[in-house]
Image (cartoon, grey):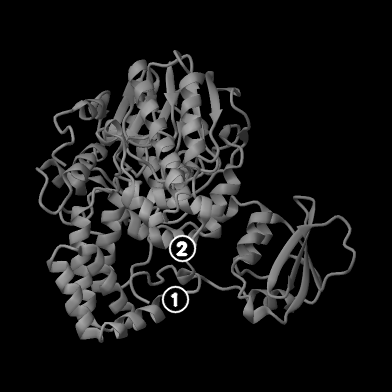
Amino acid sequence: MAALPFEDTRDFENADRGFIASLAPAVVKDAEGRTVWDNDAYEFLKAECPDTANPSLWRQAQLASKQGLYEVTEGIYQVRGLDLSNMTVVEGEHGVIVIDPLISAETAAAALALYREHRGDRPVTGLIYTHSHGDHFGGARGVLPRGTEEGVPVLAPVGFLKHAVSENVYAGNAMTRRAVFMYGDRLPKAPDGQIGAGLGMTTSTGTITLVPPTVDITETGQEETVDGVRIVFQLTPGTEAPAEMNFLFPDRRALCLAENATHNMHNVLTLRGAVVRDAHIWSRYLDEAIDLFDGRYDVAFASHHWPTWGHDDVVTYLSEQRDLYAYLHDQTLRMLNDGLTGPEIAEEMRLPPALENSWHARGYYGSLSHNTKAIYQRYLGWFDGNAAHLWEHPPVEIAKRYVDAMGGPEQTLAKARGYADSGDLRFAATLLNHLVFADPGDTDAKQTLADVYDRLGHGAENGPWRNFYLTSAMELRHGENTALLDATNPEMTAALTTDMLLDSVAIRIDGPRAWDEDLTIDLVLTDERRHHRLTLHNGALTHRAVSTPRTPAGLTLTLTRPQLLGVLAGGSLDGIATTGDPALLARLFSYVTKPDPGFPIVTP
């Protein structure tokens, strides 16, 4: 850390620039009085870095924890520090355009109220989602409550809804559980606890909502005028999100970079899980942005962190971000083609000095280690070509054999403690993890592993690594935590298309129990003028839109979409026209499982 330019304070100057006012106290509660956001909990970051934190991550946390309303340029404002992400407010002729309304409706409402307190009670006349991640749309109802959205355009990149659903619904339970570890929202906010996540502080835990888009951005160069404000778009699919876009406000000379360029190395594959991102195309789109918008802006801002002012400084920033992802991609491929595996590449990879010493290229959120492994995974998948890894035992069974091979639990624990005492925390964690999986009731092994995770977390420069280690230690000591965020609430469900709703049922069918089932149900949706056929056969629930069914269904329901939502939520068939055997619906639902939101991760 001594080689890093800690004397360079430009980021602190930019993070403070344009400050208008903060929210005091910086605490947001839901309707029941539960705290869903508390930025005041990070007051301890004003002190010098302690021994329990990496100095570089501590510096990043000091910057990311700055909170309040800021002016970016004339007519463009940001509220920062009221959620993991930023909310940007652009003043139009009659009201305001809101960009990325945070994660929760409660924090978004508080952010908009802070803006209105200092800039006037302007109505929301437009909403823009930069991309398909939940921290950029979840608070939509906080700025557009039900009954106020009529006539308000909601802009998003093409494919937004599909990818928002696939991430937050299809694999939502697993991602949400792992996000507990990644963001550390259940950890105490303290010098030896959670100090941020690199990209922001942590996730709010309020109500996730979604107002579906009404205007798709389908091509680069597309221009839209919203409330008198001209906006020129650049589509960037496959970068930080499968559906994402940058855009320029030419009359304000301001460039929004979404989450494609933030003040850290980003994730090629986020630790909570996602589709592997394309570092190659990410670099290409950053290069395209440099040329596409050249000379047309004086400031660039993003959905996280603080803006960069000055055209030349933005070009330098974008050029280094471009080079970062290109270097990661190309050097991983070079070593991959020399026969190195993902872990081997991660150990070999080093950034060029100019990037290594750039604060915005440091691994606070993504990391050099797990990003190179992600690029390897994108091209070659999970298998490294070594036949010994082709059919290994699952974690519990392989752990028992490792412990037995080392002479039993006592010898394994002693060996692990020896490695920990010698400073080899990585292998100590490996041995202790095997010991815990071989016998989760071994309290000495769990406590020792928790202590090792504490030490690994306190030394980590990467925010999610720190949070993963410390949350793992907490769960080893105190048991599993369920996530406070709920991406499956009625508001989210109501935003799904009918196909997506039926997909969300299909992925929860207990296939083995339904192997011998054979049933067909038709849904005639009168308000959508669509006829859907559901078939449960060979343990798989499939569905399709049909015009004239070739064969009769065992049950036909004629209903509206709101009635369908009620049925899928477990409601009755009262008021719904039925033909055939209504018992088929109960048989179908008998195979639908409910995922465990607190499934174990650090224990079997």
**Which quarter of the rendered picture does the C terminus lie within?**
bottom left
Q: Nearer the viewer, residue 77 or 391?
A: 391
x then y, percent, for residue 439: 31, 83
> What amino acid is labelled 2 in the image?
Ala
x then y, percent, for residue 98: 46, 32
Distance between mark 2 and mark 1 Cα atoms: 19 Å
x then y, percent, for residue 402: 33, 80
Q: Nearer the viewer, residue 83 or 312?
A: 312
Residue drawn where x is 22% and y is 78% of the image:
445
Q: Which mark is residue 174?
A: 2
Mark 1, residues whose alpha carbon is within 10 Å: few (<14), some, or many (≥20)? few
Instruction: Answer with the quarter of the image where residue 570 lies.
Output: bottom right
Instruction: Answer with the quarter of the image where residue 575 lies.
Output: bottom right
Q: In the rendered view, would you say 152 is above or below 534?
A: above
Q: Tell me if I can see residue 230 in this picture.
A: yes
Decide: marks 2, 1 in contact (CB < 8 A)?
A: no
> What amino acid is labelled 1 in the image?
Pro
Q: In the rendered view, would you say 107 is above or below 398?
A: above
Q: Nearer the viewer, residue 591 or 558?
A: 591
What is the residue that sits farthest to the front in this orientation? 338
- Left/right placement of residue 281 relative to residue 538 reads left
Q: Earlier in the sequence, mark 2 or mark 1?
A: 2
Mark 2, residues whose alpha carbon is within 10 Å: few (<14), some, or many (≥20)? some
- Left/right placement of residue 144 relative to residue 411 reads right
Q: Which mark is residue 394?
A: 1
Q: Secondary structure at mark 2?
A: helix
- Left/right placement of residue 386 relative to residue 300 reads right
